[in-house]
Amino acid sequence: MKRILAVSLFFALVASPLYVASAKHGAAGCGLGSIVITENKKVHQVIAATVNGTLGNQTFGISTGTLGCETSGFTQKQAEQQIFVHMNFQSLEQEFAKGSGEKMEAFASLMGCSDMGTFGKIGKEKFSALFDQNSPDSFLEKMRFEVANNSALVGSCKI
């Protein structure tokens, strides 16, 4: 038992900072341990890493973007877009028909688009194709396709 504890302590003190270095959270990374224990001394980081590892909260934090963990990856952006479209589908349909509007601009921003005028113009031109199935998921899929394949939007959008 002492040997297992000694190996664990060695890993926590020596090896773990080599694998999980983070300027924002120290060697322990994000999680409840890093929120509760804010000092960046090795002993404190070992305790924070132990709390993060034993309670499994670091995995939860990484998955949900809580506990000081950030999730700004591709999957997170797609989930944000999907939630936004589902919550605002009727407003988006009305604003795309006009080619402008607050919800449409917010959606363009979620799609990584900086040129709102072009986004609105393309949305208005392609309105009937985008909304032909009257489904938020269908609209989102078609809009992603349009952004990725339209020369005017490719330069303006970063999805």
Image (cartoon, rainbow, N blue to C red):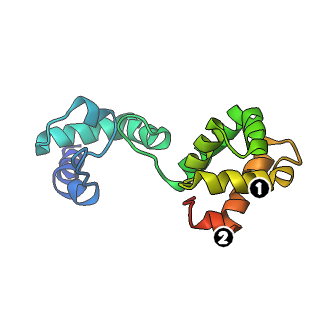
What residue is disc 1 on? Answer: 142
Q: Which structural element holds mark 2? A: helix
Q: Is residue 112 left or right of residue 151?
A: left
Kindly identify which residue carries mark 2.
151
Residue at the far top: name it. Answer: 36
Q: Which mark is residue 94?
A: none
**Disc 1 residue type?**
Lys
Q: Marks 1 and 2: which is nearer the front?
A: 2
Instruction: Name the amino acid type tagged 2.
Output: Ser
159 vs 150: above or below: above
Residue 31 is situated, as x and y percent measured from the top left of the image, at 34, 38
Q: Residue at x 10, y 42 (%)?
A: 41
Judged from the image, the secondary structure of the residue bearing numbered disc 1 is helix
Q: Is residue 128 above or below residue 106?
A: below
Screen quadrant of the N terminus? top left
Quarter placement of the C terminus? bottom right
Q: Residue 152 placed where, x, y %?
A: 64, 66
Q: Nearer the viewer, residue 96 or 86?
A: 96
Q: Which label's residue is closer to the chain start, 1 or 2?
A: 1
Q: Residue at x 19, y 44 (%)?
A: 2
Q: Residues within 10 Å of mark 2 (few under 14, many from 20)?
A: few
> What is the tally of numbered marks visible in this picture?
2
CA distance separating discs 1 and 2: 15 Å
- CB-based contact (under 8 Å), mark 1 and mark 2: no
Nearest to the observer: residue 83 or residue 89: 89
State the residue at coordinates (57%, 60%). Answer: 157
13 or 105, which is in the foreground?
105
Q: Quadrant of residue 96?
A: top right
Q: Name the spot of residue 127 as percent of width and height, x first.
A: 81, 50
